[in-house]
Every structure is written in C-alpha cells, then in structure tokens.
Amino acid sequence: MVHPTKPTGVGGEVTKKAAIAGGTAAVGLAAFLWYYNTEIAKAPHIYVGEGLLKERVYPRCTVLQQPYRPTPWALNTHVHTILGLVRKASIFGRYTRQLIITPDGGTIGLDWWMGCDAARYAPADTPILLVLHGINGGSHEGYCKWVCAAAVKKGWRAVVLNYRGCNGLPLTAPRGYTATMTYDVQRAIVSMKGRFPTAPLFASGYSLGGLILAKYLSESDSGFYEQHEVGHGVTQPPSFSGSGLVAAAVVSSPVCLANSLSKLSKPWTIDYMYNLAVAWKLREFIKEHRAMIKRTSTFDIQKALNTWEVQEMENQRVSAEFGYLSRMEYYEQASSLDYIPNITTPTLFLLSRDDPFLGVLPDKECAANPNTLLASTKAGGHIGFLQGMWPLGYAYMDGAVVGFLDATLKHYPTSSRQQGRAVADQPRCQQADLHSVPAELEQYEHITTTTAVTGAAGPGAAAAGQGTAHEQQPAAELSRLLSMHCQAAGRGPWAAARSRL
C-alpha cells in the first residue's frame, strides 16, 4: 500500500505561509468591514427643534436619513480634507461672470455655472442656488463646481458669489471682505431677485462662507436689511422680506472662531499646518492687492508678509485697521453661536465632528430653533464628505445640501416661517434687543447699517480686507456697543462656547 506523503521542501513552506497570510488578511478584512459598518457608516446625528422642519422636511431628506459611507481607504480626517481640495481637478465646466459694483465702490462677481443665467436656459421661475466660497477661494473650488453641477442636474440654476479681490476680481474699494461682512450677500440677492423675480432662491455657504451666511440669515430674518443702500447715501426697501431665501445650508463652518484658532495654534501638531496654510492665503491676498492696500490703508504690509501664523498677523493689530478693538472682538462678531437662535429661514448645518477647523458643535442652539437642522457626521474632514471607492466625484455633502433644499421647497409652507420666528427668538435675545438702538448708541445713529466693518475670513480673517481706521472705526464701535447691549440682555455668545472648550 502506498501512503501519501506530506509536502516537504521549499514549496511546502511557501504554501503554508501563503495560507497563513491569506487567512490573516481575510480576518483583518472582515474585522475592518465590521468596524466600518458598525462604527463609521452611520446616519448623521440630528439636532432640530420641534416644528414643521422636523415633521415635514427631515423625513423627506433621503440622504440625511441614510448612513454616510466615507471612502474606506481615506478615513483619516486630514486625508479626507486634502482629497477634498483635489476635487477641483475632477470636474470641468465654465462660468459666465456678472460683475456688481457696490455703493462703496467694491466689486463682487456672480459666476453662473455653464451660462445658466441665459433666458433660454430655463423658465424664469426656475430655482437658483447661490454658493458662498471659503477664505480666498472662488468659483474654481471643487466644492463650488460639484454643488453647482448637482443643482443643474436637478434642473436649477447655480451661481457662485466671488468676494472682493478673490478669484481674479480687483480690489476697487478700501474695504475687502470679512466673515462679518454680510452686505455683499444681500447685494447679490437683490441683483438675482431683479433678474429672476419669480425664482425661488437658495444659498449654501462653505467654511468662511458658512459664517457669512449664518450671520446674514440672522440679520435679515430679524429685519436688519429692511432698507438697503442704492448709492450716495440713498436707501430704499428691498424687493423681498427677510433673507429672500427659501432655504439655506451651512457646510463645514468653524462656528466659533475662538475655539477654532485655539485648536490650530498648537505647534508640532498636524492641525497647526492649517494655521500656516490660512496665514499663507492671507499673505497671497495682500501680495495680489498690495498697491490698493498701500493707497488706502496704514496697514504695515511688509510686516504682514513676514508673518507665518494667523495669531501673529492679528496680534500686530491688523484687526484695528478695520475698527475692532482686538482680534477676540472680531471672533465674537464673526462666530455663529449667537446668530443661530434668530434664524427663521429653514437652514441645514452639515458639520463633521472630525473637522480640524470646527470650533464647537452648535447642537444646543440648533435643537432650540425649529428653523435650523444640524446634521453631524462622525467623519468628513473639512469640506470633504467624500464617499465611495473613488473619492473625487459626487460627495455626500452635495446630495445632502440639494436634497434638503428641494425638500424644503416642496414641503415647508411659506406661511409658517413668520410663526416660527417668535418661537426661535424666545430662548435668546428678542428681536428688539438685537437690532434696536439703545440710548447709549444714539450718537451713532448717522451710521448706515449696510456699511458694516469688513476684513478677511476664518481664524485670520482680519487681514484680507482693507480700510482706514478713520473710515472703519465708527461702524466697529457701533458693532461693539450693540454686542455689549445684547450681552447685558443675557445673550453673550461666550457662555455657550466656554462650556464646550
């Protein structure tokens, strides 16, 4: 009888090692898939006040109802954030630029995706999405192009607002742009309403654009823009009430700038690299518009160009060039925590808990307001929200934003927004406390509210806009005293922020 023999020699050893390696890989893959599906791929946490937004809109937001499945081989927040920047190279398209000259001589640009502003493109009542970009960005950014493409695929028009001096625009006024400057957003909406008076308007803001949009919504919903300047000090009522928007979305906003900069200011950490990157973008803005800045400002240009950190730039009293007493005052005026309670326009806040720029999660603020919905994901990075094995295509945030806006348009009655305003305002300062002028401010009544303090964005925002101290100081002082008045009424923005440092 012949008995089988066991494999011997080199070949047998190789086979054995290959089997062990294959088994180990299979176990590892199974463990990763279990971890990914149980811990990572989850629907976002939702925070929303009781009301029609929760009852009628959220149940119809399919994307927000389903688990977000980030790219499995790019789960690290920094990889996610960097790949998000690369998305600009994965989509091609063109814009038609519309220039708008503001009453103070500034130039902003509306870039219409694929010429969709043409009358023959779609009926006049076709919905329009307005996109607000991040610091020193523009319509060329990947997130702008992809959300515009998603909106056009839905049958809408899409347009990107380019801030003063950004994306090829000249700096034609002493004032640049800043996270506290909402007037140019209102000017853009007035222009869009003039061209398409019957079209429903939406807006989505990313990073710095999210800060600007949240502040604009709070101010306009509270009646701050009941009059707007048309030139030479002449004002008139706008052609719309409130924000003029059917709905809005804020994506990857820092929310609280003081907390955000605190995270980004620790040397020898990866987050510190973002601090250096923001400072670099501010220096690039200064270099590009050096001649105009030199003519209109006492700003020390060379000193700023030798600065490598955001806080260094601001500690040189750059903020004082725009009328702020300190950079902390600027952070207070730019942060969204104190604006969220006053928003009555249905608004989605889409934030990732691993976003390196996120200062604080506004869960309490959004949960107390029936007009705001916070969707918080575990992963996503900063303006990333990549999905699928190929991360440079259609992102989770694109579907979430367009889906929310569409659901609001179809299922949120316009008549209920006025009812929601009183409910939203009660937990915080009343509308009169926020926008009425107390006795100590009577000396500043000559100041037009639309000439608010301007500057730059993000944690280093003060460096990007320009203006003489003489020109800016009164508006900043008004802003400061209004803030003090509101804090005395019990609505200081730092109370909530400090509890979550």
Image: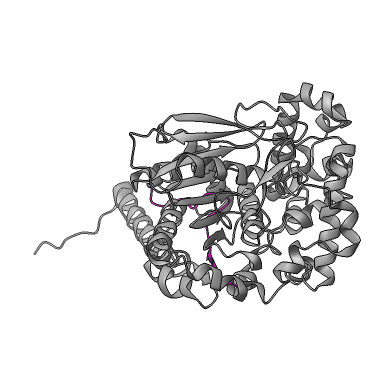
Closer-to-camera residue (197/260): 197
Q: Is residue 81 left or right of residue 459?
A: left
Report x, y in % for residue 96: 46, 29
Q: Is residue 70 above or below residue 49?
A: above
Closer-to-camera residue (84/333): 333
Q: Main secondary structure of the magenta part?
A: loop
Q: Quadrant of the C terminus?
A: bottom right
Instruction: Write down the region rendered in magenta.
Output: 369-389
Report x, y in % for residue 126: 37, 46
Q: Is residue 148 left or right of residue 225?
A: left
Picture quadrant of residue 466:
top right
Q: Is residue 239 above or below residue 430?
A: above
Identify the residue at horizontal 75%, vertical 64% (top origin).
Answer: 434
Q: Is residue 373 magenta?
A: yes
Q: Is residue 492 above or below residue 400?
A: below
Query: In this rendering, does residue 9 appear at all?
Result: yes
Q: Is residue 500 magenta?
A: no
Closer-to-camera residue (137/339): 339
Report x, y in % for residue 490: 79, 74
Query: In this rendering, does residue 132 appear at all?
Result: no
Identify the residue at horizontal 43%, vertical 75% (top origin).
Answer: 55
Number of numbered callouts drawn: 0
Identify the residue at horizontal 55%, vertical 69% (top origin).
Answer: 418
Q: Quadrant of the N terminus?
A: bottom left
Picture quadrant of residue 282:
top right
